[in-house]
Amino acid sequence: MFNFFIVPRKLIVAVFILLLTPLAKVNAEDSPPVSTTDKSTDSLPKINQYAQLDAAPVTSVNQLSDVQPTDWAFQALQSLVERYGCLAGYPDGTFQGNRAMTRFEFAAALNTCIDKVSQRLSADIVDLVTQEDLATLQKLQEKFSTELTTLRGRVDALEARTEQIEQQKFSTTTKLNGQIIFAATDAFGDASRSGNGDESNLTFSSRVRLNFDTSFTGKDRLRVRLQASNVVNPIAPGNETRLSFQSGSNTTNDVFLSKLEYYFPLGETIRVLVGTGSNTYLDDADVINPLLQSDADATISRFGRYNAIYREGGDTGLGITFNPNGNFKAEMFYLAGNANNPSSGLFNGKYGLLGQIIFYPNANAKKNTDTKIAFTYVNAYNENGLGHNTGSLASNLGGRKVSSNSYGIETNVKINNGLQVGGWVGYTNARALTGDVKGNADIWNWAVTLAFPDLGKKDNLGGIIVGMQPKLTGSSAQLSGLPRRDPDTGLHIEGFYRYQINDNISITPGFIWLTSPNHNEQNGDVFVGVVRTTFNLENNKK
């Protein structure tokens, strides 16, 4: 029995030619060089080797990039291609003639040549294939009958396994992916703002999401999201310490429909989004913050996710993105808050209308979106104060119907692969429509962000956020129950580091430091520490 584990492929080709072409002559000086050191057996699985042998059939020896006319086996290779048409290269266009060949590979290649010769005999191409050639090939086939049988058995087993996997798939069109968050949180300082010192305890909370993503054309996506959560605000009253992964007001682990949306393209430049859900805001637009990524993988705080003006509006509506070229993008969103209520519907109740223009000064928007600047406008109507639910109590204008116009500038600049600098400024002019006194109010918020992608290793992320949560800076009249303005200015200082353990698990320690909470120096500073563990679960990957 021959051992083909250490026989170069070119030598096997020469043997083929000697066997298939009795008149072929190989001169002594054309003999292959002998190597006693090349004992490579190739560690790739055998089934990949079989597939590769027939993966890239060639019609001319010139198609093989690593075969040169000066090679000692060039004429043999040329004969196999031109006379029998049974030579195949690897998918990368190479022949790899000096690589060692196994008996399994030889059996697969031999079987291919037998099929080609049989086809030519059936077509009566007697001038190309002789009976002597066929007899020689039949002897080789008998010699390698064991390997051919084993190969066929493995292919049959592979096909059976593939069929089993297909039958057990969740869906042929729908991908199921999920996310689980566990978070340990503690707050220190004047937690209750009552002057009684630290009144907070270490807490442990969780959130679970299941997404069912379906595509009908390959370019669209229908998402159905179910969610259960018990994450609460670490410190009450107010929302300055509200966490990024606290979603909606449901904190009792009840399962509910969190999001239902469908987006699809219209031509090459327009994308349309139709959506609803219990916690949808205008954040389906581009919020220009590399520290966002998702509320479970980046920022710790709700405020740190994006400009507060994106939180105006409702939960049901339409979004359109227009991207005509690489340096400009326009977005428009309309979201109503009580779309299923016959008394208000889509246009007579709570709503938010956003218009946004994004410029990419130094990059192509379809390839590089790191450096950009956006100008944002939001017109909104809310029935219980403003909808941002961050910042001071006065800045939310709670308990009254409010119409508002908000303006924002957001930007991010990529300094290098390891550093991005960004931030935003947001201004809201709101008018109280109910209450003992009606009047206008001015609310500002701003932030500066530093992002450190791949800090320590790939997919890690470090982040720092310094800013001012929404603050009531003035009002035209003394609104009932509210001051004319917040007395002082407090800062929001946040830092976090996401350590990516693997593709599915990350751990993110972080902290939040609030100076002068509620924008009042009479309140002591508050510190919040969080350790968040995120599990991303995926099934049915396409």
Image: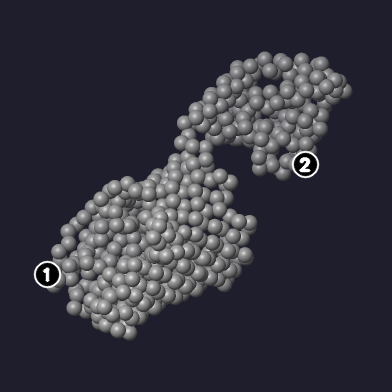
Q: Which residue is mark 1?
A: 196
Residue with the most extreme bottom position: 476
Question: Residue 129 location in percent, x, y?
Answer: 82, 22
Residue for point 46% across, 36% down: 170
Give the number of the mark in front: 2 or 1.
1
Residue plotted at (61% across, 60% down):
269
Figure quadrant of residue 133: top right
Residue bearing mark 2:
62
Q: Residues within 10 Å of mark 1 (few under 14, many from 20)?
A: few
SS under mark 2: helix
Report if residue 278 is visible in the image.
yes
Residue 2 horizontal/vertical position (percent):
63, 21
Tell me the element at label 1.
loop
Name which residue type carries label 2: Asn
Image location (x, y in percent) of residue 526: 22, 69
Frontmost residue, 35 versus 281: 281
Work out whether residue 279 or residue 420 is closer to the camera in this orientation and state it: 279
Task: State which quarter of the image contains the N terminus.
Answer: top right
